[in-house]
Image (cartoon, rainbow, N blue to C red):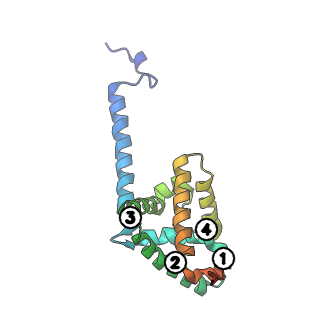
Amino acid sequence: MVDRSIDHPLTPKRRWFLKTALAIGAVGASLGGLVYWHRGVSNGKLTEHGRDVFRGLAIGFVGPMLPKGKAERDAILEGHLQHLEVFLNGMPNVLQIEISAIAGLLGNMPTRRMLTGLGPNWTSASDEEIAQAIETMRMNPLPTTRLTYQVVRAVTCMAFFSNSAHWKIAGYPGPIEI
């Protein structure tokens, strides 16, 4: 006869441990597959998910500088995404892969919710929801999430402000001739 009094969750058995390990592995593999499937950059071009993420991030980081008119704002954001592709293609392959993975994380609903708390995709989110999502990443207690925030902020701002067409929007008159 087996004594069931010793079958307690605080004293896990080998079978319980194996089942738990398999469940965690399956969840991790499925999230990894989603990130790969919805990666941000493919063959040097922003994917649909990458465009969605970086458009939302641009609204979050430089949104107050953008014009209020929808047509002007959309034109500037589209120009930013085109310039961002050129900017990313100038980076080493390792960085391109890492940024693509980060965009994949932020483009998938489960991982986006874990990192930012943002439920809807970046396009359908309001400016306030995007600002809150970025603030959640910035103030997160996990160092990896804060590092993700720093990476996406740096990439977005470098690509945006390195485009001379955006200097007037930011109030920068351009370099002074000597």
Residue 156, can we see it?
yes
Residue drawn 38% across the image and 47% down it: 28
Q: Are marks 4 and 3 in contact (CB under 8 Å)?
A: no
Q: Secondary structure at mark 3?
A: loop
Q: Position of residue 140 (x, y in %)?
A: 60, 50
Q: Which residue is mark 1?
A: 65
Q: Compare marks 1 and 3 and give the one earlier in the sequence.
A: 1
Observer-nearest residue: 35 or 165?
Answer: 165
Spatial CA span between label 2 and label 3: 20 Å
Spatial CA span between label 4 and label 3: 24 Å
Q: Which residue is mark 4?
A: 61
Instruction: Return the mark for residue 92.
Output: 3
Q: Are marks 1 and 4 in contact (CB under 8 Å)?
A: no
Q: Position of residue 39 (x, y in %)?
A: 39, 63
Residue 71: which quarter of the image?
Answer: bottom right
Q: Position of residue 120 (x, y in %)?
A: 53, 64
Observer-nearest residue: 177 or 102?
Answer: 177
Circle 1 or circle 3, nearest the eye = 3
- Count numbered badges in the picture: 4
Spatial CA span between label 1 and label 4: 9 Å
Residue drawn 63% across the image and 52% down it: 139
Spatial CA span between label 2 and label 1: 13 Å
Residue drawn 66% across the image and 79% down it: 172
Decide: is 127 above or below 95.
below
- Decide if residue 91 is on the left or right side of residue 113: left
Q: Dot 4: few (<14), some (14–19), or many (≥20) neighbours within 10 Å?
A: some
Q: Secondary structure at mark 1?
A: helix
Q: Which residue is mark 2?
A: 80
The amino acid type, in three-letter code, at marker 1 is Met
Residue 126, can we see it?
no
Q: Compare marks 2 and 4 and give the one earlier in the sequence.
A: 4
- Decide if residue 90 is on the left or right side of residue 123: left
